[in-house]
Image: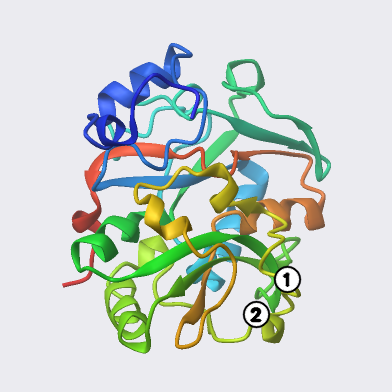
């Protein structure tokens, strides 16, 4: 986890406190478990001359890329999400791409920041996790995968969708999850696929090619890990669009310069998840 807190302590941290810890280098690992109930975001930063195409790509592919906030060119302060936040320092780890190739995974992006950069904030699927738990929905969050679901292209941006998989204990739990997640379009909304992983190009759930949340053991409920990757009789695997999708699009488009979050290292805002929910 890269910090001194237990999971229970991390869940109770205030957003300003976790941002301060991250900024000072005292929290360097995944922060999905911190600040339970507060809205967390994936990050995509592109030059201003690519920003319209990126926004159009996001608008055409809302389930993996719903943009909830953005900064003006060169402005690193997302005031609409948190008064004291700085996008250059307030995520535990970042990814930096040049010409579509990964060149660095720093813990801050101060040396990379430019006057022409625009930061986009895309709601994370973890924002619905606490709601599932409050509703007693029984499931296991497995990991992230590259699917064969095509995104709608926009200008130079194109790719297949990244997805996350959760396995639900019963059809009842699955239906409840669909009802709940549909209220949160900013957190990827309803699932994009239900059922066989192979139908969307995933050959083996045991080998996530984007992130393995089971091995990371960064969940709030260890019982979710108990059955590993095996889909038991009666269980229902479901897949949501993932905020890593813009990284795949950046690689495919060979964006001259792009900065994103590192998987599971998110921006944590001062807003509650419920502030983004549909009534």
Q: Toward which corner of the image does residue 162 lie, by quadrant?
A: bottom right
The percent position of residue 90, horizontal first and vertical second, equals 44, 26
Q: Residue shown at 60%/54% (left/top)?
A: 244
**Residue 204 - label:** 1
Q: Residue 197: percent from the left, percent from the top? A: 65, 80
Q: Residues within 10 Å of mark 2 (few under 14, many from 20)?
A: some
Local packing at callout 1 (Cα closer than 10 Å; few below 14, some 14-19, many 20+) is: few
Q: Nearer the viewer, residue 124 or 134?
A: 134
Q: Quadrant of residue 10?
A: top left
Q: Which mark is residue 124?
A: none
On screen, residue 157 versus residue 274, left or right, reads right
Q: Residues at badges 2 and 1 in contact (C-beta under 8 Å)? A: yes
Q: Position of residue 187 (x, y in %)?
A: 39, 61
Q: Residue at x 72, y 65 (%)?
A: 155
Q: Secondary structure at mark 1?
A: loop
| Closer mark to the observer between disc 2 and disc 1 | 1
Cα distance, mark 2 to mark 1?
Answer: 8 Å
| Mark 2 or 1, nearer chain start | 2
Residue 83: tell me if it is visible: no
Q: Secondary structure at mark 2?
A: helix
- The structure residue drawn at horizontal position 31% and vertical position 67%, both measured from the top left corner, is 184
Q: Position of residue 73 (x, y in %)?
A: 52, 35
Colour convention: rainbow
Q: Above or below — where is 146 with respect to 6?
A: below
Relative to residue 97, is residue 278 depicted above or below?
below
Residue carrying label 2:
197
In this view, the residue in front, 250 or 240, is 240
Q: Is residue 242 left or right of residue 176?
A: right
- Image quarter hosting the C terminus: bottom left
């Amino acid at each position: 986890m890269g910090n001194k807190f237990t999971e229970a302590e991390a869940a109770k941290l205030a957003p300003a406190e976790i941002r301060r810890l991250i900024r000072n280098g005292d929290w360097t690992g995944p922060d999905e478990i911190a600040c339970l109930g507060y809205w967390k975001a994936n990050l995509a930063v592109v030059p201003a001359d690519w920003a319209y195409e990126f926004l159009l790509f996001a608008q055409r592919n809302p389930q993996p890329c719903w943009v909830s906030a953005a900064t003006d060119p060169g402005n690193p302060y997302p005031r609409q999400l948190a008064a004291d936040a700085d996008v250059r320092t307030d995520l535990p780890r970042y990814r930096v791409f040049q010409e579509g190739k990964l060149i660095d995974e720093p813990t801050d992006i101060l040396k990379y920041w430019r006057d022409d950069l625009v930061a986009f904030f895309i709601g994370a699927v973890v924002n619905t996790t606490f709601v599932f738990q409050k509703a007693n929905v029984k499931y296991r969050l497995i990991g992230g995968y590259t699917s064969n679901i095509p995104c709608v292209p926009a200008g130079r941006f194109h790719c297949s969708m990244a997805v996350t998989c959760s396995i639900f204990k019963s059809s009842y739990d699955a239906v409840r999850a669909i009802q709940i997640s549909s209220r949160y379009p900013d957190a990827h909304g309803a699932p994009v696929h239900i059922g066989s992983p192979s139908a969307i190009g995933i050959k083996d759930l045991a080998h996530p090619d984007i992130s393995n949340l089971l091995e990371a053991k960064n969940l709030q409920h260890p019982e979710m890990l108990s059955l590993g990757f095996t889909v038991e009789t009666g269980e229902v695997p479901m897949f949501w669009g993932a905020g890593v999708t813009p990284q795949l699009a950046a690689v495919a488009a060979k964006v001259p310069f792009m900065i994103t979050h590192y998987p599971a290292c998110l921006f944590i805002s001062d807003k509650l998840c419920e502030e983004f929910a549909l009534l």
